[in-house]
C-alpha cells in the first residue's frame, strides 16, 4: 500500500463517529418523546392563576367575596365551596372576574372554611386560590 493513496482516500466517515451521532440522536428523541408521553410538557400551563380575594363575613350567615387583584379569571373556572357543603350563591360573579368584582354567598356556618377553587379549563386539576374561616 502506498502512502500517497492512503492520505488521499476519503470514502467514508469513521464508523465510531457515526455510532456516536446515532446514539446522541436516539437519546434526544427518547427524551422528547418521553416528556410528552408522561405529560410533563403540559404541566407548565397548568399552574393556578395568581389572584387575591377578600372575605367579608356578615352577621346573617353570609359572606361577600371580592377579587382584590391579580389575574382576570373566567367565572366558569371558579367554584366557591365550604367545609359543610351548604354554601349557596346569592349574587354571582360576572362572567369575567376582574379586580373589584364581588359575589355574595349565604348559608355559611360558624367556623366553616370557605374556599375559592380554580379548575383548569384543560381539565384534570383544581387549585384552591383563596380561603377564609367564618368567625364563631
Image: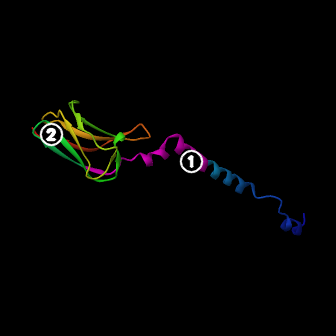
Magenta-tinted stretch: 28-52
* 44 displayed left or right of 50: right
Query: Does residue 105 appear in this view?
Result: yes
Work out whether 16 lies above or below 108. Answer: below
* 81 displayed left or right of 5: left
> Residue at the spot x=57%, y=44% of the render?
33
Work out whether 99 lies above or below 77. Answer: below
Magenta portion: prevailing SS class: helix
> Residue at the spot x=56%, y=47% of the render?
32
Q: Which residue is disc 2 drawn over?
A: 134
In terms of secondary structure, where does tag 1 sit?
Answer: helix
* 44 displayed left or right of 67: right
User: Is there CB contact under 8 Å for labels 1 and 2?
Assistant: no
Q: Say whether residue 48 is magenta.
A: yes
Mark in the foreground, 1 or 2: 2
Q: Where in the figure is residue 22, as x and y percent of width and height?
A: 68, 51
Quarter placement of the N terminus: bottom right
Q: Where in the figure is residue 131, as x and y percent of width and height?
A: 23, 43
Q: Where in the figure is residue 45, as x and y percent of width and height?
A: 44, 48
Q: Which residue is disc 1 drawn over?
A: 32
Q: Nearer the viewer, residue 74 or 112?
A: 74
Q: Say whether residue 15 is magenta.
A: no
Q: Where in the figure is residue 119, as x and y percent of width and height?
A: 36, 40
The answer to which quarter of the image holds residue 74 is top left
The local crowd at label 2, few if under 14, some if 14 to 19, many if 20 or more residues have their Cα within 10 Å, is some
Query: Does residue 82 appear in this view?
Result: no
Q: CA distance from mark 1 to mark 2?
A: 48 Å
Amino acid at each position: 500500500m502506498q502512502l500517497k493513496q492512503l492520505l488521499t482516500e476519503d470514502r467514508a466517515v469513521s464508523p465510531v463517529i457515526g455510532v456516536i451521532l446515532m446514539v446522541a440522536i436516539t437519546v434526544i428523541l427518547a427524551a422528547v418523546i418521553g416528556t410528552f408521553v408522561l405529560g410533563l410538557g403540559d404541566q407548565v400551563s397548568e399552574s393556578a392563576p395568581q389572584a387575591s380575594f377578600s372575605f367579608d363575613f356578615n352577621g346573617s350567615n353570609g359572606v361577600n367575596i371580592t377579587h382584590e387583584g391579580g389575574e382576570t379569571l373566567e367565572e366558569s373556572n371558579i367554584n366557591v365551596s365550604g367545609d359543610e357543603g351548604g354554601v349557596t350563591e346569592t349574587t354571582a360573579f360576572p362572567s369575567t372576574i376582574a379586580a373589584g368584582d364581588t359575589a355574595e354567598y349565604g348559608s355559611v356556618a360558624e367556623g366553616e372554611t370557605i374556599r375559592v377553587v380554580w379548575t383548569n379549563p384543560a381539565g384534570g386539576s383544581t387549585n384552591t386560590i383563596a380561603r377564609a374561616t367564618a368567625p364563631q
